[in-house]
Image: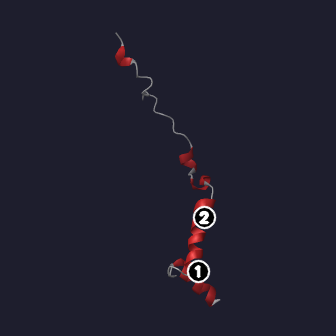
Amino acid sequence: MSSIRRIAHNIFVWSYERGTIQYDIICALILAFIFLVPPSCFVSKRAAKPQAAHPQVASPQQNAGAGLRR
């Protein structure tokens, strides 16, 4: 039981030196997490909903010809 606690402590505080197999495994796990988890897991549900534009703000396309009248 103490060996499991020691391993968990070493992983948590990142006490392995560079070039060891343990360091390489931890780095591979981090990279696998980054590249294999779908991006939808990192999107907030509130941020995913499109925000409606303020009703009084006109878009640039609507005002494009406004100053060119003769």
Question: Disc 2 marks which amino acid?
Answer: Phe
Comparing 66 with 20, the one in front is 20
Q: Label 1 to label 2, Cα distance in Å?
A: 18 Å
- Extreme front residue here? 19
| Direction from residue 20 to residue 36 in the image, left or right | right
Q: What is the x, y in percent for residue 15?
A: 50, 82
* The disc label shown at residue 68, or none: none
Disc ID at residue 33: 2
Q: How far from the left and from the top, in percent, is residue 34?
A: 57, 62
Q: Is residue 40 above or below residue 70?
A: below
40 relative position to 17: left or right:
right
Residue density around tag 1, few if under 14, some if 14–19, many if 20 or more, within 10 Å: few
Which quadrant holds residue 64? top left
Question: Where is 38 relative to 52, above or below?
Answer: below
**Picture disc at residue 21:** 1
Report x, y in % for residue 48: 56, 46
> What secondary structure is marked by label 1?
helix
Eye-nearest disc, 1 or 2: 1
Task: Choose the circle earlier in sequence order: 1 or 2.
Answer: 1
- Secondary structure of the residue carrying numbered label 2: helix
Quarter holding the C terminus is top left
- The colouring scheme, among rainbow, by chain, secondary structure or one colour, is secondary structure
Residue at left 56%, top 43%? 49
